[in-house]
Image (cartoon, rainbow, N blue to C red):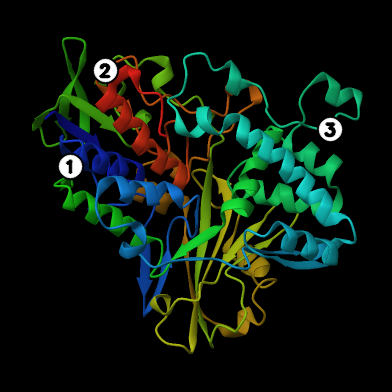
Amino acid sequence: MARIAVIGAGMGAMATAARLAVAGHRVTVYERGTTYGGAVGRYEREGFAFDTGPGLLHLPAVYRDLFVKTGKRPLETCVDMAQADPAVRHVLPHHGVDVALPGASRGGVAAALDGAFGQGAGERWNAVLGRARDAWDATRRPLLEEPLPADRRALAADPYPALRRSGLLRRRPPTLAEVADRELGGGLGELLAGRVRAYGIDPGRAPGSAAVLPYMEQTFGSWYVRGGMRALATAVHERCRERKVEFVFGAEVREVRTAGGRAAGLLLADGSEVAADSVVCGIDPRLLPAASLPWPREAVPARGPDLPSRIGLFLALRGARPPGTVHRTLVHSPGLDVTVLRPDDPATRPDADHEAVTVTAVCGTGGTAAVPPHRLLELAGQAVPGLRERLLWHEAHTPADIEAATGAPGGAVPAPALAGDGGRLLYPANTTAVPGLYLAGGWAHPGGGLAHAGMTGALVAGLIVEGAEFRGSQ
């Protein structure tokens, strides 16, 4: 039985802790805040409740696998999870388009797009996602299910099999924006670009492989946990406790201690020392002091200073949620897209005569001046008829609030890793040049998002339990 110290109680850190505890290790989680879940929080006021982080789960199989591997009770007995259908509604005011796309139905999506954009639109859309499927098949294991290889050339090249129609595209792989423009065009291309922007990824700079993100949504669906996504964090925390994982809250880590050339424990801010055989860093490793240990270059995320954050508005509305309301709406607007979430969940509202709505937009880290609340309300009104008349109050959720919850500088929110672009959209490996120190959570391979962070649990646990021979989940 080894002693494992885990820094942070985010989703990836807890997923790692639960798997390590099942393997027989003694695991203790040290969290600087007062609760678990990281960005997966909940805001409550006057009987209304809102998710402060992700509002939907993609690739639910990641958490199903976690619960199967760590106990007798499967995920579905721990949370009430339902697939959103329609999966998403797109509102494009500048194109005069308002279309809802069904969940996990290739034919249904094609029919809806034909009706909105004209005959043949659905076929073009499915052709693009078919090429995205090829990219998914080519990189799924090395990008999501296996430790990051030392030789990353296979992930540096863009796997998206683009149609090459011009000299420009013969010289270099296309960006996602070029894929959207050349293979879809007009408002249909905007659907693809907007879906990728919602992840905090710039289509003008991202490789064509970013098309795997809408492909995953359409193929595996979008899922909501009744009671809010915080209920998923609670279920993972409870599973950790069932497996005898210990949690110490209010425990800020000052240093990762080393001895004999490997990680040997932690020094906490209160001066106490923690001995450990291995350390799992479940937070952005840049948050640890530079003097903490001799950081190898590959242990620090290579992302630039333009990391995305989120700004949100929690809206308390009078009046019942209309029947047939779509759970998620994307309102596309030049320079700013907003996502409007309207869950049909009694746990989010004081009674049936009110509705709780969450509006979010991607913004830069550190500030909200570029996205004023009145602009979010204006765009949200495209998705919620009579919004101004129904509004009781609204509360802003800013990058500063995200920073307070997660510690990420400026409230940065990591996006999923992508293949292509020379490997610049990858995250650091789960192992480091310091033996016994591992990286988990959204700031490590394979990147951000609920599902991707959860995948780090299987990767880090496999590396600790099986060692260098571990080749990935089966």
Tell me if residue 348 can be seen. Answer: yes
Q: Which disc number belongs to residue 163?
A: 3
Q: Amino acid at mark 3?
A: Leu
Tell me if residue 35 can be seen. Answer: no
Which residue is depicted at the point 71% across and 56% down?
106
Q: CB under 8 Å between callouts 1 and 2? A: no
Label 3, secondary structure: give it. loop
Q: Position of residue 87 (x, y in %)?
A: 61, 63
Which image quadrant: the C terminus? top left
Marks 3 and 1, Cα distance to the nearest angstrom? Answer: 53 Å
Q: Nearer the viewer, residue 396 or 293?
A: 293
Name above or below for residue 314 compared with residue 468. below
Name the quadrant containing residue 436. top left
Crowding at mark 2 (Cα within 10 Å: few <14, some 14-19, many 20+): some
Q: Amino acid at mark 2?
A: Leu
Q: What residue is pinned by disc 2?
A: 293
**Among numbered discs 3 and 1, the one appearing first in the sequence:** 3
Which residue is depicted at the point 61% across and 21% down?
156
Name above or below for residue 187 compared with residue 462. below
Q: What residue is pinned by disc 1?
A: 251
